[in-house]
Image (cartoon, grey):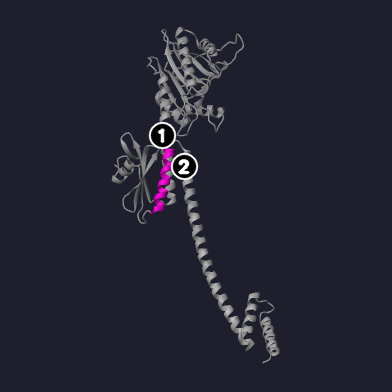
Amino acid sequence: MTDDLRAREREEVVRALKEALCDRSLPPDVWRRLESEWADEPGDALAVGLRALADVVGERDRDLQWHQSELEQTNAGLLALHAEIDRQRHRTSFLDEVSRASARSLDSTHLLEAVVELVGSHGLADTMRVWTLTEFGLSCRDEPEREPDKTTRSAARTRELARDGGLRISVPLTAGPHVLGVFDFHRTTVEFGDEDLSLATGIADRVAVGLRNANEYEREHELAERLQRAMLPTLAPLRDLGLVARYRSATSGVHVGGDWYDAVTRRDGTVILTVGDVTGHGVDAAVVMGKLQNALRAYALEGHGPAASLRLVHDLLRGLDTPLYATAVVAEVEPDAGVLRWASAGHPPPLLHERDGGARYLEAEHAPMLGIHLPVGLRFPQHERELSPGSSVALFTDGLIERRTSDLDAGMERLLEAFRTCEADALDAKAEHVLRTMLGATDHDDDVCLLLCHWEG
């Protein structure tokens, strides 16, 4: 076959290939491969071309299979990576929830209850037991009579996670050098793995910080309340009058408050009642409170009436080196005559509770709060009325009636209703009813003083 015939045959083969490809072009390297094969084997151009194409297709197929294998491995790796990222994100999100729950409350009981609920919803353990360290050793909050077992004691003693087989772990709650308790995690089927142990340790570490803060707050709050109570008087029993006092510290904060109450008896039998409130909290407020309380007692025992006593205390406070102010109400009762005299300086008015259940405030003109600048010669008003037999007089601080969620008028109306609905005759029971109605189980931001005086007549 001449070269011209072979050239025409190759052209026919090329044209046939292009028609078969529907005008789609082959890569340049494939055409170069065909040209090379035709140059090396000048025989049947079609056979040579088909064989060359078959070799190219085989090579491409092997390359495609290799790339497919690589792609499958890559996809599998990406899926595994995404699964790991999701798992880590879920783990981090859960630990963030634990951190928030541990920081949300300074009540250790509420804190631990919230964490137990979170662990239960997460599914880390089927059951969980919480142990806290007290002065008597480890104590189970839900089962006070239960004794810790060997695994729990080991975790507390070594400060490290302890295992009891594959279905039980005990994790210590450590904050700095202190062990605050132990978490016991239990499962019924699937054993704890390394990731579970790491998660349990992360939970315990976060809870320990919150528990330490809660414990410190509770200790400081208890100390402040004990100091406050130590500064308040013990009421002496009286023959002709019933007296009951109640003090409740604010449920938030650890500062000593400025609320006080007092009751003293003059030689002539007149009983003087005082309730007051120094602005602010802390040591400064407590110091001012002590000075005003003692001064009012002294002035009252000297024979000064309620208005005169308040004016003298105002002058005393103006002379002190303090930016604090105060409110106070002073009342004196003559048991033999059943006469009540009172004066107020910026303080809520006394409440009169009658034997028939009626209750009303003794609204009357009052002086400004103690310690502010007053015009020269300003008179402190004083008021007087007769008491009906079986009536009671209540003096209180604003912490009893003020709430963030309602205005002062609503609080005063609630207090009237609390007295009107009280069915107790005993003064102690009446005081508890009022506090229960006004405070309940809710938090209150201010200290509360309540002083009740009952005149039987």
Position of 408 with respect to 1 (left or right) is left
Work out whether 172 lies above or below 294. Answer: below
Magenta span: 193-211
Q: Is residue 17 left or right of residue 234?
A: right
Q: Residue 101's mark? A: 2
User: Label 2 to label 1, Cα distance in Å?
Assistant: 15 Å
2 or 1: tag closer to the N-terminus: 2
Dot 2 crowding, Cα within 10 Å, few <14, some 14–19, many 20+? many
Q: Which mark is residue 215?
A: 1
| Visible residue check, residue 27 | no
Residue type highlighted by circle 2: Ala
The secondary element bearing badge 2 is classed as: helix
* Residue at the image point whose x is 57% and y is 75% from the top: 60
On residue 335, which mark appears? none
Residue 93: percent from left, percent from top: 49, 48
Outermost residue toward the bottom in this view: 1
Q: Where residue 353 sits in the image (x, y, percent)? A: 48, 22
SS for callout 1 = helix
Q: Is residue 84 visible?
A: yes
Q: Nearer the viewer, residue 140 or 46?
A: 46
**Which image quarter: residue 435?**
top left
Whether residue 205 is in magenta: the answer is yes
| Coordinates of residue 318 in the picture (x, y in percent) | 55, 13
Q: Residues within 10 Å of mark 1 (few under 14, many from 20)?
A: some
